[in-house]
Amino acid sequence: MTHERPRARSRLLHQMTRSLRPPLLLAISLAATAGAAAQPPRRTAVPPPSCSAVTQQTCSTAQALGRGINLGNMLEAPREGDWGVKLEPVYIDQVAGVFDTVRVPVRWSNHAALTADARLDEAFAKRVDQVVDALLAKGVHVIINMHHYNQLSGNPLHPNEKEVDPAVMDTRLVNMWRQIAQRYRDRSPRLLFELLNEPHGRLNGEAWNTLAPKVLAAVRATNPTRAVLIGPGEWNSVHELKKLRLPPDRNIIVSIHNYDPFDFTHQGVQHLAKPFPLGTTCCDARQRKAITDALETARQWSAANGHPLHLGEFGTYEKVDLPSRVAYTRFVRDEAERRGIPWTFWEFASEFGVWSPKTGEWVEPLRRALLD
Ligand code: GLC
């Protein structure tokens, strides 16, 4: 925990201040090779550590999540485009051509009524439909979530984010999910719901243990068996798994995030309250141990508790030196996969990205580290 605290604090301050500098799209122009998109989808060969608490179908779904990508900084910006990237149709072709799973972070909370009923904005919901359906049509697994509902965890608002009365905050979460679940009730089981990205702050511990079952119940009213992802507090930290109390439901996959070593992955990020200097490379024995300890903690929790895992986010900022980004990416990928943990890399085309919107090409060494 001593190791976790500074990181958690940094993450909080990061979120509080990120809006001061919207993500930059610094093009990293590296030679892309022909045939990059020809890579066939691949699945995690190692089965989950345990599936004793889930159905056979959810166990298979967890394993099929395989290798994936986040379409980050797009639909979870306060308004699409606010953070420099829009979810272009060509991105759907790019990611679906090479990954098994696409996680689509969505900021529903800023596109819903501010009252308790949280009626979804239909134009925005249709935009999400378009993305979800285009991805499902490509045959990949798709994860949609509830991303950057900042007030819920006690964070200040981003610019262009609307404030809600604290008295209706939690109810809004439940009611947004009731509508989302109803909306997608007939979609393929390849569509997964993730109840909340990185609960933290006021939601840590018992608060999330109490709220998550209410949200899940709203989903289950229309989607009795769809696989749902739920993660622990402190930004989905593996160290919080021991505090996570899941509702009795046989279709839950547990989501974890890991950016260890944080001073390496987030070096140069200027909107951290106390930015880490550039120049940290990866991965020496101490750094490798930080990564494997975290993944091993998660694997052991899964083996003991019977829910398969998903590593929903890991990645590095674009200013980190490229050979180290590549070494880190391949190492995390291999260590997760050997433990039967499927993953979605953070992220596709923004400041942690594996693809450059400026050149229209993959950052090829990073792509290879994820997929070859
Ligand atoms: C966070 C968030 C994401 C953020 C990323 C990098 O966990 O989910 O929105 O940009 O990590 O710091």
Image (cartoon, grey):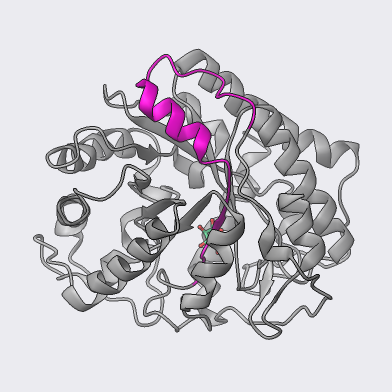
Left or right placement of residue 303 versus residue 113 in this view: right
Q: Position of residue 313 (x, y in %)?
A: 57, 50
Residue 308 horizontal/vertical position (percent): 48, 27
Side (left or right) of 169 relative to 103: left
Q: Residue at image x 79%, y 73%?
A: 32
Say left or right for 110 vs 340.
left
Q: Residue at x 33, y 47 (%)?
A: 193
Q: How many marks?
A: 0
Residue 317 quadrant: bottom right
The residue shown at (45%, 83%) is 82
Q: Is residue 108 left or right of residue 27?
A: left
Vertical order, 236 against 80 (above or below): above
Ligand 1: give its quadrant.
bottom right
Q: Determine whether 209 is above or below 272 in the image.
A: above
Residue 25 inside the magenta-drawn segment: no
Rendering coords of residue 203 (x, y %): 35, 45
276 above or below 238? below
Q: Residue at x 25, y 40 (%)?
A: 211
- Point out the stretch of residues depicted in magenta: 45-73
Residue toward you, 42 or 19: 42
Which sits in the foreground, 122 or 11?
122
> Can you see residue 233?
yes
Query: Foreground: 109 or 193?
Result: 193
x and y percentages locating residue 27 in the rendered image: 72, 82
Q: Is residue 167 visible?
A: no
